[in-house]
Image (tube, rainbow, N blue to C red):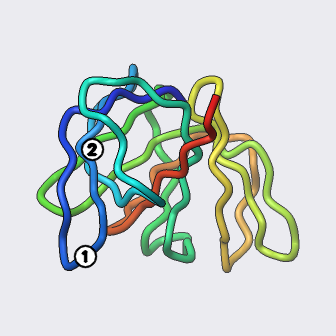
Amino acid sequence: MRIEIEKTFTVQGKGKVNFSTEYGKATAYWNGELPEEGKSYIVEIEIEEVCFLGKNLEIHEEHKFSIEMDNETIYLIGYLESSEEDGYAVLRLGDSIVPLEVKNSITPGSFVKIVSNKITLYDMKY
């Protein structure tokens, strides 16, 4: 996913970034050396939590891609593209995919909302 870095900072020795995308803005941890503010990067998003339907994963009626933040809570809305028996699932956010771990069965093929307190961005170095 293409993001633009708005601000970088450190919290308890860990790098964090405020970033924006075509789908919205949020704050995330950054894996590795902090990026440059004002520059664009191609990143992979990792959701740190296991997703449970009815807890931090829900079917979403609105069919649009979105990244939002309220206080420290991040909301990702995307299309659940696949879900395997072993818990591996793929969330589509526009042209990008986000791997998930889902602990209860959910049928792919609908828009879902993921609620998370921690995501990490990995620079794909493109």
> Of circles 1 and 2, which is in front?
1
Provide residue 84's location: percent of width, then percent of height: 86, 64
In the rendered structure, the answer to whether residue 7 lies left or right of residue 98 reads left
Q: Label 1: state its secondary structure.
A: loop
Q: Which residue is mark 1?
A: 13
The vertical placement of 96 against 57, above or below, is: above
Provide residue 41's location: percent of width, then percent of height: 47, 30
Q: Residues within 10 Å of mark 2 (few under 14, many from 20)?
A: many
The label number, if any, that marks residue 100 in the structure image: none
Q: Amino acid at mark 2?
A: Ala
Is the residue under label 2 in contact with that under label 1 (CB below 8 Å)? no
In the figure, residue 21 lies in which quadrant?
top left
Provide residue 68's location: percent of width, then percent of height: 28, 42
Q: Label 2: state its secondary structure.
A: strand
Q: Amino acid at mark 1?
A: Gly
**Quadrant where the image shows the N terminus:** top right
Provide residue 67's location: percent of width, then percent of height: 36, 39
Q: Which residue is mark 2?
A: 26
Residue at image point 55% right, 75% down: 52
Q: Nearer the viewer, residue 37 or 116?
A: 37
In the rendered structure, the answer to whether residue 86 lies left or right of residue 50 reads right
The vertical placement of 77 against 72, above or below, is: above
The vertical placement of 44 against 6, above or below, is: below
Residue at image point 47% right, 71% down: 54
Gap between marks 1 and 2, in whole Å?
20 Å
Q: Residues within 10 Å of mark 1 (few under 14, many from 20)?
A: few
